Amino acid sequence: MKKKSSYKNLVLIKHPLVERDITILRDKKTKSEIFRSAVTRISNVLAVEISNAFSISEFKVDTPLEKTKGFRLKQEIVLIPVLRAGLAMVDGFLQLIPDAKLGHIGLERNEITLLPNSYYFKTPKNLSKSEVILLDPMLATGGSASAAISVLKKRGAKDFVFACLLAAPEGVKKLLKDHPDVIIFSAALDRQINKKGYILPGLGDAGDRTFGTL
Ligand code: PRP
Ligand code: URA
């Protein structure tokens, strides 16, 4: 299900269902409700791939018949969607990791400078002991993801994965340069960003398409 990429620390997901769903997202005719359900399905697959590296611990469980070996996740998982568009990925992750905690980071790109402006931050305490999965569908210039991770590091977070749907080479390079310890999981690697900071071929504005604010 994973595809090698030319970037260290970028894992690309290769799966026929993901290819189909990315196409649904790219199609400008796709309505918000269909868009959201495709994001959820891709997020399911990302959650499976990312959680493959989680540690588990063994304990005894009583079946109705006898005792046997059981397993639980060792670490607490914290999902942190970047508002707004990252919210669309939350359901798909929670379906597979229902006991994950949630934090929220509000960032909005300035349309002229393309720099992220922070307007909200609330996360569970004790991030240093948690596996943090940052959720944002788009890695374009990389400014938002890099800023989000810098803030989380200041709050103590140590183990990061960044999960996105589409990544541009510019964003991958910036994020891995600013935070070489982060692993990026993406459903696709697109060609480039345009002058307005949009990913090409892309899917347009992920927040607007998710929430119908076009
Ligand atoms: C989008 C997206 C990312 C950011 C990516 O958010 O969800 O957070 O742009 O761009 P970057 O890599 O160049 O920083 P946007 O600022 O459009 O806000 P929204 O989710 O509220 O629409
Ligand atoms: N943010 C989006 O929503 N889309 C892009 O193509 C780039 C940044």
Image (spheres, rainbow, N blue to C red):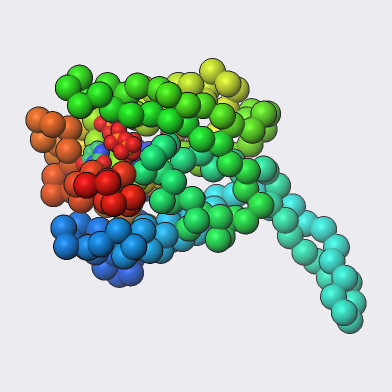
x then y, percent, for residue 208: 27, 46
103 relative to 176 in the view: left or right = right
189 relative to 106 in the view: left or right = left
x then y, percent, for residue 63: 85, 75
Query: In the picture shown, does residue 201 fall above or below 122?
Result: below
Name the one closer to the observer, 152 or 173: 152
List the single residue furthest toward the bottom. Answer: 65
User: Which corner quadrant of the image does residue 146 belong to?
Assistant: top left
Name the one closer to the observer, 31 or 189: 31
Query: In the picture shown, does residue 155 fall above or below 80?
Result: above
Q: Residue at x 41, y 51 (%)?
A: 88
List the single residue furthest toward the front. Answer: 213
x then y, percent, for residue 119: 43, 24
Q: Residue at x 48, y 21 (%)?
A: 151
Name the one closer to the observer, 109 or 97: 109
133 relative to 74 in the view: left or right = left
Q: Quadrant of ligand 1?
A: top left
Q: Residue at x 51, y 35 (%)?
A: 104
List the single residue furthest toward the left. Answer: 195
Q: In this orientation, does residue 162 appear?
A: no
User: Which corner quadrant of the image does residue 117 belong to?
Assistant: top left
Q: Residue at x 67, y 29 (%)?
A: 125
x then y, percent, for residue 138: 30, 42
Name the image quarter holding the N terminus. Answer: bottom left
Q: In this orientation, does residue 66 appear?
A: yes
Task: Give the mark count.
Answer: 0
Query: In the picture shown, does residue 162 fall above or below 99?
Result: above
